[in-house]
Amino acid sequence: MKAFTKTKYGGPEVLQLEEVAKPTLKEGHILVKIKANSANPADWHLIRGEPIIARLAFGLFKPKDKFTGADFAGVVEKIGSNVSRFKVGDKVFGESMKSGVFAEYACVPENVCALMPEGSTYSEMACVPIAGLTALQALITHGKLKEGETVLINGSSGGVGHFAVQIAKAYGAKVTAVCSSKSVDFVKSLGAEQVIAYDKENIHQHIGPYNLIIDIHGNLNFADFKRMGERAVIVGFTTLGHMFSVLIKKAFSKFPLVQFTAQATVKDLETLATLIHENKIKVAIEKTYSYKQIPEALSFIEAMHTKGKVAMVWEDKDI
Ligand SMILES: NC(=O)c1ccc[n+]([C@@H]2O[C@H](COP(=O)([O-])OP(=O)(O)OC[C@H]3O[C@@H](n4cnc5c(N)ncnc54)[C@H](OP(=O)(O)O)[C@@H]3O)[C@@H](O)[C@H]2O)c1
């Protein structure tokens, strides 16, 4: 089968499309014929080995894992022993950083997968896992968002942001979204009541107030969170130095601020599938690439100005 591999750290050009053996099925896993993937900042962080501190986990001098990719959608080809939730032929989507899903086939744990909702496409559902889970867990699990509350979403037009705006609306919140002026119409179309263009208004002087602040871009200061919100969640970071300076100030304060890493859970994947089935959230795909162009897709998203998501498909008819 074809798979993207990496043997050194570097830009997306270090990825090689190779002919490799199909993965062996393990207990509690399913073998998925991959139909589509999506690109996430986590992919290029891993490929570049950045931030450098991450190399303690991912390999000091070169990547420990030859294979790569996280988000996928596809068809169950085989099921391993002790798999109870899926059968051969099911259409599934999910997220696994360790399964090398930028490939024709991947062996993934069943507990990071869910059934695709009826009527959805592989490219749509491949765009959901990391970005959708992160948005849902930021707002609901960690942000404890309640119906009728106000939320400021900083970095609202990208993968995580465009889901966050729609999920907050679906849970009955009033959304103020922050993005560049070129993304204002897009973010309004997702349901944001108010939009602040960060290139026209200085967010570091904005007063608010809001019940909840979700900082997806990761450039807000501790003083910004305290000035604008009752509680806050950090999703992304601009520099490690900035994030540490915010977290150190938080350690000496009672202000409720959470920084977290999203986890794939069956419950949250199924919640996202239901929201999509009920038309409460739509997946916006700015660009769709062929699987052969996965390195180009990763280069495109590295600019961090994607509107919605970028998908990669393994067959043209699967778009
Ligand atoms: N904690 C976690 O578990 C977790 C999970 C997933 C992602 N993340 C992190 O979350 C961040 C966003 O991920 P993503 O997939 O949504 O990335 P993305 O699709 O590249 O979106 C980034 C968005 O940031 C916006 N942006 C750029 N400069 C900005 C600024 N100065 N102020 C406000 N917004 C700005 C851009 O909007 P414009 O184009 O309108 O400028 C763009 O749409 C990344 O840092 C990623 O590593 C964390």
Image (spheres, rainbow, N blue to C red):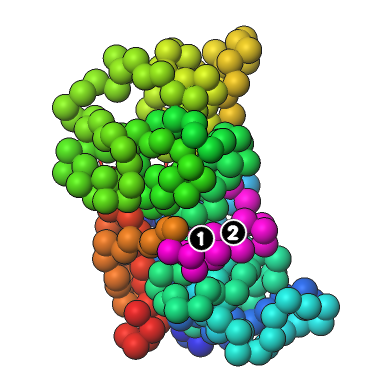
Q: Secondary structure at mark 1?
A: helix
Q: Are marks 2 and 1 in contact (CB under 8 Å)?
A: yes
Q: Looking at the picture, which amino acid does disc 2 mark?
A: Thr
Q: Quadrant of ligand 1?
A: top left
- Give the secondary structure at mark 2: helix
Q: Which residue is mark 2?
A: 271
Q: Amino acid at mark 1?
A: Leu
Query: Residue at the spot x=77%, y=74% of the render?
Result: 28
> Residue 285: image x %, image y %?
31, 63
Is 23 rendered above or below residue 278? below
Q: Which mark is residue 275?
A: 1
Q: Is residue 206 left or right of residue 108?
A: left
Range drawn in magenta: 262-279
Question: Ligand 1 within 8 A of label 1's CB?
Answer: no
Q: Residue at x 35, y 79 (%)?
A: 319
- Residue located at (44% from left, 30% from top): 150
